[in-house]
Amino acid sequence: MLDTVINSMREMVGGCCVCSDERGWAENPLVYCDGHGCSVAVHQACYGIVQVPTGPWFCRKCESQERAARVVSEASTKPTQDMSFIISLIITSWC
Ligand SMILES: [Zn+2]
Ligand SMILES: [Zn+2]
């Protein structure tokens, strides 16, 4: 399981994880995810980013992890069954 994650991360390093092109253009730049330990890079157009933020940008996986983290802290009093549902959401939303 962990090996699969590491391998898929390795494949994403060095280029757009949608079209695998390493080049970026002024009108279609490569955007790198600022998620912790995340090396996802995508073109603005490939990922459908409307506006490249001036601050940190997060891919959908990291964005959903951030959202899930918020949900977890809000739902910390709920039974652990909800946790496994959230974790399955994180896994299925992998880039
Ligand atoms: Zn691309
Ligand atoms: Zn990310």
Image (tube, helix red, strand yellow):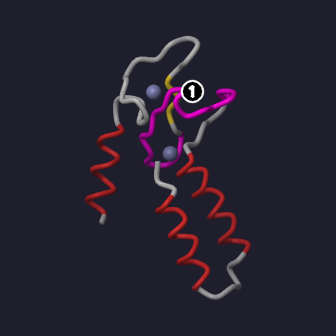
Query: Type of residue at label 1?
Result: Gln
Q: Which residues are magenta?
A: 34-54
Q: Name the residue rendered at 56%, 26% in the picture.
A: 45
**Residue 43 picture location, percent across and down:** 51, 27
**Which residue sits furthest top?**
26
Residue 57: image location, x then y, percent: 60, 37
Label 1, secondary structure: give it.
helix
Asked if 25 appears above or below 7 in the picture, the reply is above
Q: Quadrant of the N terminus?
A: bottom left
Horizontal and vertical percent for residue 53? 67, 30
Name the residue beneath numbered marker 1: 44
> Is residue 15 found inside the magenta-colored segment of the image?
no
Q: Position of residue 52 (x, y in %)?
A: 65, 27
Residue at 55% from the left image edge and 11% from the top image edge: 26
Magenta-span inclusion, residue 41: yes
Relative placement, left or right, of 33 versus 37 is: right
Left or right of residue 17: residue 36? right
